[in-house]
Amino acid sequence: MKIKITLGLLIFALAISCQNSDKFDLESETKEILKAEAKAREYHFKKNVKALLGGFSKDFISINNGKIEKPTYDESFKKFDSYFKSVEFIKWDNNLPPIVRFSDDGSIAYVAVDKLVIVKFNDEKGNKVIDTTNFAWLSVFKKQSGRWSLDCIASTRR
């Protein structure tokens, strides 16, 4: 009888401990995601393409201007390098606080962003131009090997 009770308690304890291992710390993970968003801002102002792309997953997907693309690292590098070299960032700021949500198991996060981007660049004639764009996008992050990486971004502008 004691063995059955002990065995029952052991199985119960194991079941409880397994359940708790699937939990994630919502506050901590939200801070990590918001930190990644803040780093992206820093990388834009510092024009650090390598650091920016270091946060992308190997299977990164971009949805923009009615197109779905799965760019390679080299394609993304070329695109961002060209963009960063052609503009000076004046603002890359949230209009509203980002909205962060997680999958039930905490392995996927998505962030709704409302961002004001103001850049300065030279037009074809060499004149300084200031461009202001309001973006709304959804970033999807995947946690792999304990690290969040940007897996997909779907962007619109107004």
Image: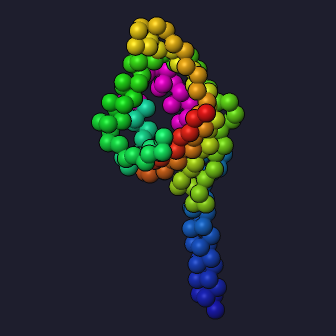
Q: Residue furthest left?
A: 74
Q: Is residue 44 magenta?
A: yes
State the image coordinates of residue 78 (x, y, percent, origin top left). Answer: 32, 30
Residue shown at the point (36%, 25%) measured from the top left: 81
Residue shown at the point (44%, 45%) measured from the top left: 67
Nearer the observer, 8 or 138: 138
Give the vertical position of 80 relative to 149 (above or below): above
Of the 4 image quadrants, the one containing the C terminus is top right
- Quadrant of the rendered image containing residue 79: top left
State the image coordinates of residue 103 (x, y, percent, origin top left). Answer: 59, 57
Asked whether residue 120 appears in the rendered view, the answer is yes
Q: What colouring style does the render use?
A: rainbow
Q: Is residue 46 magenta?
A: yes
Q: Residue furthest right?
A: 96
Q: Residue furthest front?
A: 125
State the image coordinates of residue 101 (x, y, percent, origin top left). Answer: 63, 50
Asked whether residue 34 appears in the rendered view, the answer is no
Nearer the observer, 119 or 104: 119
Magenta-tinted stretch: 33-51
Nearer the observer, 147 or 5: 147
Q: Is residue 116 left or right of residue 73?
A: right
